[in-house]
Amino acid sequence: MPGRNKGLDWDDLRYFLAVARGGTVTAAATQLGVDHATVIRRIDRLEHALAAKLFERTKAGYIATTTAERLIGDVETAESAIIAGQSMTHGTAARLTGVVRIGAPDGFGSFFLAPRLVGFVGHHPHLGIQLVATARLFSLSKREADVAITLSMPKEGRVVGRKLVDYGLGLYAAQSYLGRTAPIRHRSDFAQHIFIGYIEELLFTPELDYLPQVSPAIAPRFTSANLIAQLNATRAGMGIAVLPHFIASSCPDLLRILPSFSITRSFWLLMHADSKDLARIRAVADFIYEAVEKERALFDGKPALPDRQSQGAS
């Protein structure tokens, strides 16, 4: 490392990595749970200790200099060593402390995971949980999440994980919508109906591109990048949507249409190879596995709806 490095503080290097990975002070402050001024102060202090400029400050964000690019690899190596040391000195029997960030799709994170985390959080009073439930990809290498729930297994990177569960999706609409529109008995009837779906250019993964499997002729009239917005629009009677059974089955105002139509997707649970053995991260991952396993039938759509009728047959 260049310059005067006697006063280097690992925390300053941690802030450096957060800015380098996030590209802005705002992103780094959010990741680290501090204010902007703290991030700026730490970066200034590190630059002074190294006698080197690490970032070009621009309106668009912080751009790493050549010196910073060289430094990133060394600091990430040190970070991996620290994480490995923590995993060796903190067994599963130790009190869980620190913060674990979970990145998950909005539907799984908000509807399934959030309410089930109540007991886990209560059982570990010294552990903080950050649940980022949103439709996006999470970079484990940039530490955007410690545990990520995704719709596919990445083909590269220092990531470990396994399939969490297969889940089914079907066509749903509100009783209020079906009561004022033409009946649906076959897919050919869809031409008379309004569909709800994703904004095509904002799809963060091809696994969410459902409507072409329903019919290539469907052009949704209401679109959103957020599954919860689609669900709420469907429940309000706007039209028909492809929804996961584990969400739609909890909404008594929704009816399933053409029950023979079904789509299957998978959730994967991923962790970074360097941090997977940390007690707090392993405990969170184990909890998610167990919570899903206990209610696996919910994802199949099997608990289905004894008091609700479906429309159509094919």
Image (spheres, helix red, strand yellow):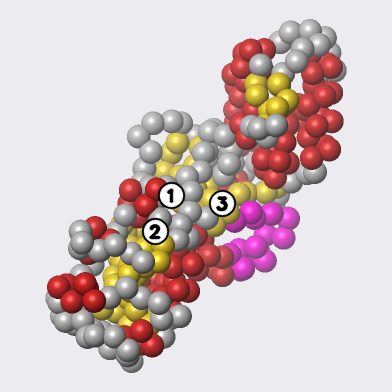
Q: How many marks?
A: 3
Say the numbered circle drawn on residue 26.
none
User: In x, y percent, where is residue 297?
Assistant: 34, 71
Give, as a single range, the part of the protein colored magenta.
Answer: 117-131
**Relative side of 26 to 289, left or right:** right
What's the residue type where badge 2 is placed? Tyr
SS type, badge 3? strand
Which residue is farthest top? 3
Camera-side mark, 2 or 3? 2
Residue 131 lies in quadrant = bottom right
Q: Circle 3 is placed at which residue position?
A: 102
User: In x, y percent, where is residue 310?
Assistant: 26, 84
Say the numbered circle drawn on residue 202.
1
What's the residue type where badge 3 is placed? Ile
SS type, badge 2? loop
Q: Circle 2 is placed at which residue position?
A: 198
Residue occupying image coordinates x 64% and y 54%: 130
Q: Is residue 285 above or below residue 250?
A: above
Disc 2 from disc 3: Cα separation? 23 Å
Q: Does residue 164 show up?
A: no
Which of the marked residues, 1 or 3, is nearer the chain's N terminus?
A: 3
Q: Is residue 47 above or below residue 83?
A: above
Residue occupying image coordinates x 43% and y 79%: 235
